[in-house]
Amino acid sequence: MSIARILAELAIETAPQAFTRSSRDAALKMLLDTCGCAYCGMDAPGIRELIALEYELAAPGNGSVFFSERKLSLPSAAYSNAAMMHALDFDNNYPKADIHIMAMVVPVGLACCEEAGASGRQFIDSVILGVEVAARIAKPYMSAKRQHSYFLTTSLVGGWGAVATAARLLGLTVDETVHAMGIYYAHTCGNRQALLEKSLTKRIQPAIAAKAALYSVLLARRGITGPEQVFEGKGGFYRCYTQDEPPPRETFTASAIHAIEELSVKHFPTCGIHHANIVSALHLKREYGFEHGDIKQVDFFLHEGGGTLVSMPFLPGAYPQIDTQFCAPYAIALALNKAEVSVGDFDTKKILEDTDTWELAQRTREQVRFVDMNLKRYAEPRPDCKYTKVTLHDGRVFEHEQASGVLNDPASMGVAEVRNKFRQCVTMHGDVDPAQVERIADTILDVEQADRMGEWIVHIFSKKPHAQMPSYCLADSSSAG
């Protein structure tokens, strides 16, 4: 049996009774987190333009565009909504597979629910299976000997998870799902160059994969065929993208479905590489109470070898939001300046006004070698730890070691903590009645009780949650294009 057929059977034939309560609870928590990310991403740079273009070019259909009364074809709706969910890089992390999977399976699943009239229970089942399929493909890819670090695993692999989600909800057969996986392989793409150059394309790559996944499923439903040996063939995914032999088929046949429980919630809307340094900076600021003007110099150590994506000095360009999200000196300086790092701090207007953090970021630098940190409290670096050192003008020096692993632990943020993050996200672009925010959160966590997801989507992604909304949220299409 081919790997694609094994995964297709998993997606289509798994009975609802196979899901544990812990998996369902994990899916609900991650859904709350992902919906919150759509709220804070609704007006991020590039989103207005992307959605306006879809309004101009795409066909109407049954797929809702969040915060709008407009409906588009399923691929276009999923594309627009996925871009919002991933825009601030605040959506989930999957440490074992290096993918932002929820920003693909959730918008694809919601679009398909509207088409199929599916229930909330069916939606959650499809999300769990989409995550599972993507994880089973991504884990051996990440462990391959010659896996190239500049491919973007999220959009390379995540689209197959979205194929599984869509195929289940739209009622495809196993054979049709195999073809959909083969068709999606023709779309497989994604690289880190957009991230290296801090361009807006970075935030839409998962959306491109989501759109392609849904398009592939719709083609397969109409009888278009795709190759079956997409993973193990001579030109299959593993040989093509790793130049290694594909993993054995037994890798994909595990009976337990638990990948959804391995997802972690991101603590900060920045690249995860330096989250531990942010935590260290917050600890030092709160413990010793110095002001940003007291600081002579900040040094940090990432175990990354220097000159990495996030270690470069802060130099704001055309899109300061992206420049700050992927700049460790800025994020560490922000923590030391404000004693907090919230998603609201990454609003473009606030970034431009925060000259104190700008100035401190210029005095924050990476040390490539641990020995150059010249730490007194920590003699040797531990592999999983990042280090931050603050030197004041009066000669005092403060140091802190922070393990990264604990921040990637799925248990590090429970539902209560995710609700706090959700409140942050919903209110980023303006005031919302606190009672309304709690009602929205409750509705998300009760999604399994929804009979028809179309009505649920209206409740969650109303076009009027804030006093002021982006222009594309207006119902009048003439103002959107």
Image: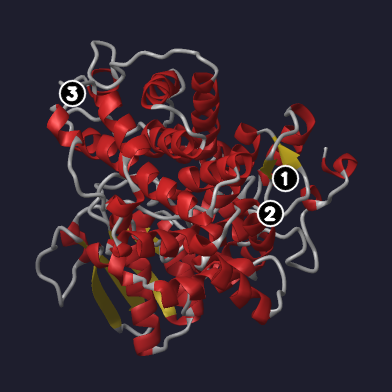
The disc, 2 or 1, on the residue closer to the chain's N-terminal end is 2
Assign a secondary structure to mark 1: helix
- Name the side, left or right, on which 351 lies relative to 206: right
Residue 352, percent from left and from top: 65, 62
Q: Amino acid at mark 3?
A: Pro
Q: Quadrant of residue 178?
A: top left
The disc, 2 or 3, on the residue closer to the chain's N-terminal end is 2
Residue 57, percent from left and from top: 75, 27
Which label is found at residue 246? Answer: 3
Q: Quarter holding the C terminus?
A: top right
Going 44% across and 37% down the picture, which residue do you hit?
A: 168
Query: For the residues carrying marks 1 and 3, which lies nearer the camera in this image?
Result: 3
Front residue (pair 60, 477): 60
- Name the side, left or right, on which 356 lies relative to 96: right
The answer to whether 399 is drawn above or below residue 227 in the figure is: below
Residue 328, percent from left and from top: 41, 58
Q: In the rendered picture of this protein, how many numbered marks are placed on residues?
A: 3
> Can residue 298 be seen?
yes
Going 29% across and 47% down the picture, which residue do you hit?
A: 306
Q: Is there CB contact under 8 Å for labels 2 and 1? A: yes
Q: Amino acid at mark 2?
A: Asp
Where does label 1 land, which residue?
A: 48
In space, the residues marked 1 and 3 are separated at their CA atoms by 41 Å
Front residue (pair 13, 29): 13
Could you classify mark 1 by the number of other residues whose Cα lies within 10 Å: few (under 14), some (14-19), or many (20 or more)? some
Could you classify mark 3 by the number of other residues whose Cα lies within 10 Å: few (under 14), some (14-19), or many (20 or more)? many
Query: For the residues carrying marks 2 and 3, which lies nearer the camera in this image?
Result: 3
Which label is found at residue 441? Answer: none
